[in-house]
Image: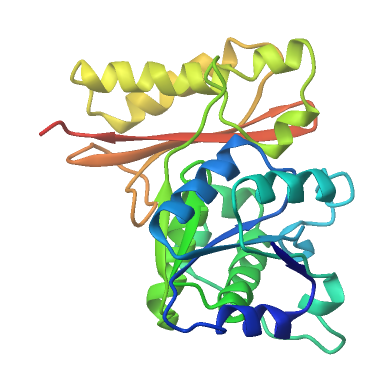
């Protein structure tokens, strides 16, 4: 497994054999089973697999947890080695944003709602770093998790608009046995707050059950999520949403499908989760 901080070495390895397909898994480290599931998908569908580990500063607001974000590089590298990853890119901030850097990627409408409304600078940082990583690694396919649903919409929009020659593959959410979606930020939860965090999944399951029993009014489903969260004393709601899965615009009535998502604080820790509701065949 080649581990490098150097962009030119990544490109040299990538194009050593142009006939090989490459799957790419961009991460911020603190890897868990959710990340590893993406690596396994990439391994199954490509000749070779690359991953990146980089805590991207441009997607954090000044009030957010950049300095506290978990960094476990040696452990992460061992996990990737065990999964048969061929190349790991671990750049420094100066490698990614050298002195004089001033170019950013802004995706418009789909970044203005949900996470974008709560974290206004977040997706400019995400789109910029992913665009740079795509240009550096030049993968055949790139793998992302459904847990960051809006991120996948933003990246797909960017890929279409800027004509990146990469297939974006979105893989299912991996959950703990009690339903909590796997996240690097789960490490911040302890005791009562860890137990309380399962309320996100309970809210989503309540919505899914109502949908399966015929409920199609989006505001009724949003209210169901709000009420479920409100019943958990350690939870503080940021938002709930029942939106079009492609445009992220809020729905009045569900016709074919909907992205149901929410963000909730437990103390200073903010968690997100989602499900997609679809009419059965």
Residue 96 versus residue 139: which sits nearer the camera? 139
Q: Is residue 158 above or below residue 214?
A: below
Q: Quadrant of the C terminus?
A: top left
Q: Is residue 259 left or right of residue 10?
A: left
Residue 17 position, x and y percent, is 50, 82
Q: Is residue 251 above or below residue 91?
A: above
Q: Residue at x 60, y 32 (%)?
A: 182
Q: Is residue 14 above or below residue 79?
A: below
- As drawn, the residue found furthest toward the left would be 281
Which of the 4 image quadrants contains residue 180?
A: top right
Residue 118 versus residue 122: which sits nearer the camera? 122
Residue 39 versus residue 195: which sits nearer the camera? 39
Residue 86 position, x and y percent, is 62, 63
Residue 250 position, x and y percent, is 37, 45
Q: Is residue 76 above or below residue 241?
A: below
Q: Residue at x 79, y 18 (%)?
A: 190
Residue 65 shows in this picture? no
Residue 142 versus residue 247: which sits nearer the camera? 142
Q: Quadrant of the N terminus?
A: bottom right
Residue 14 position, x and y percent, is 58, 78
- As drawn, the residue found furthest toward the bottom would be 100
Which of the 4 image quadrants contains residue 272?
A: top right
Which of the 4 image quadrants contains residue 53?
A: bottom right
């Amino acid at each position: 497994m080649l581990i490098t901080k150097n962009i030119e070495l990544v490109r040299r390895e990538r194009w050593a054999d142009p006939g090989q397909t490459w799957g790419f898994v961009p991460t911020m480290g603190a890897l868990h089973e959710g990340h590893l599931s993406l690596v396994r998908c990439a391994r199954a569908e490509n000749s070779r697999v690359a991953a990146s580990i980089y805590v991207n500063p441009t997607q954090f607001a000044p009030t957010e947890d950049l300095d506290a974000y978990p960094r476990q590089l040696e452990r992460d590298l061992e996990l990737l080695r065990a999964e048969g990853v061929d190349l790991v890119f671990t750049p420094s901030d100066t490698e990614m944003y050298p002195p004089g850097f001033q170019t950013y990627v802004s995706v418009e409408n789909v970044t203005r709602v949900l996470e974008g409304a709560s974290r206004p600078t977040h997706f400019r940082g995400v789109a910029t770093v992913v665009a740079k990583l795509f240009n550096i690694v030049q993968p055949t396919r790139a793998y992302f998790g459904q847990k960051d649903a809006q991120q996948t919409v933003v990246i797909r929009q960017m890929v279409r608009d800027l004509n990146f020659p990469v297939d974006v593959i979105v893989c299912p959410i991996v959950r703990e046995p009690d339903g909590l979606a796997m996240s690097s930020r789960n490490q911040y939860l302890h005791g009562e707050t860890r137990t309380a965090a399962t309320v996100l999944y309970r809210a989503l399951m309540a919505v899914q059950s109502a949908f399966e029993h015929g409920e199609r009014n989006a505001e009724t489903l949003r209210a169901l999520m709000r009420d479920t969260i409100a019943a958990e004393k350690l939870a503080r709601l940021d938002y709930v949403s029942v939106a079009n899965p492609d445009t992220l615009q809020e729905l009045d009535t569900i016709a074919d499908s909907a992205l149901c998502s929410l963000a909730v604080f437990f103390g200073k820790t903010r968690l997100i989760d989602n499900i997609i509701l679809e009419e059965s065949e």
